[in-house]
Image (cartoon, rainbow, N blue to C red):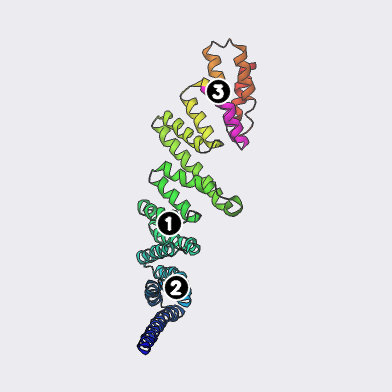
Amino acid sequence: MKKLILSLVAMMTVCAVSAQNELIAKFNEGVTALQSKNYPAAITAFENFIENGADSEDATVLSSVAQAKKYVPSCYMNLGMRNASAKNFDKAVELLNEGLMKAELYGESQIMPKMKVALAKVYQVQGGTAFNNKDYAAAAEVFAKGYEANPRNTDMALNLAMSYCELGQFDKGMEVYRNVAAMNPSRYADAIAKAKEMMALYTNNQVAKLQTEGNNDAIIEMAEKMLAEDPASALAEKIRLQAYAVKKDYDKVIELGETAALAQTTEEDKSDIYNMIGAAYNAKYNAGGNKDEALKNKVVEYMSKVTAGNNVEAAKAAIADLTK
């Protein structure tokens, strides 16, 4: 009986060793495929090995399982980029997303940022054709996915923002531009400058559209929304003041004028603000029958600050008319 028990133990040991060897062989199969860049075969071998080896009590197997879990997401990423190079963009996206899912499942968080960068690049190229053809709807749909994967891809972010603005989705475009403008200037100076340039362009376009419609209240609402996002926005201060001036709400122009002037960064823009304030005081002075000396003095004070831009000569003429 004792010999029989020993024989059974020996057989069980042999079976265990055999199973272990089969598992390691599957891992080695994956390594060989990986070395030859046969990523589909490597994925199949490694995933099979992980599934069957995860519950092993053997230290060698468990160590190899941990290594296989690192290899699998990398294989998906390499295979995805291979498909992207062949312009099989849909397949590339599918593989990269599968790799991200595997990385999350296996707890391989270190590779996930790299995979998101890769995924964003695929979306950037995929959406580029539509963008270049001015198919902004198709471009925005693709770029939005890439932006979600990697908002630090500033070239794509700027194209996404432009696509939104060209589609008339002003608020969505401005949100992306603001996000770019808020990035680290030591790393993204060029992108920040471009974002600010385009924000000004599309904001002015939107203002022009609303002015044509006579919708100054919408301009004021837009400016106040911009100021809620960025209280230091010189552009928002200026367009809000312009809208109140067009509405002939002179008290509001006077109330908000100094703050708007202080927000400006160029002498031309400061002069534009001072010209609006002076014009508001002048309108009130005229409405009162040109009798209020305090209002007259305010007109002269603010028109004297108009030193640059297109309103200099008009301001001088206004002062001369009042002081002759």
State the image quarter where residue 95 is shown: bottom left
Q: Which residues are magenta?
A: 252-277
Q: Residues within 10 Å of mark 2 (few under 14, many from 20)?
A: many
Q: Residue at x 39, y 75 (%)?
A: 49
What residue sits right under mark 2 in the picture? 65
Q: Is residue 144 above or below residue 314?
A: below
Q: Residue at x 61, y 52 (%)?
A: 186
What residue sits right under mark 1 in the picture? 146
What residue sits right under mark 3 in the picture? 255
Whichever of callouts 1 and 2 sits on the residue coming sooner in the sequence is 2
Q: Is residue 131 above or below residue 277?
A: below
Secondary structure character of the magenta stretch overall: helix
Whichever of callouts 3 and 2 sits on the residue coming sooner in the sequence is 2
Whichever of callouts 1 and 3 sits on the residue coming sooner in the sequence is 1
- The residues tagged by marks 1 and 2 sit, at their Cα atoms, a distance apart of 32 Å
Q: Which residue is at the front of the view, 117 or 310?
A: 117
Q: Determine whether, in the image, residue 313 is placed left or right of residue 100.
A: right
- The residues tagged by marks 1 and 3 sit, at their Cα atoms, a distance apart of 44 Å
Mark toward the viewer: 3 or 2: 2
Q: Secondary structure at mark 1?
A: helix
Q: Secondary structure at mark 3?
A: helix
The amino acid type found where label 1 is placed reads Gly
Quadrant for the N terminus, please: bottom left
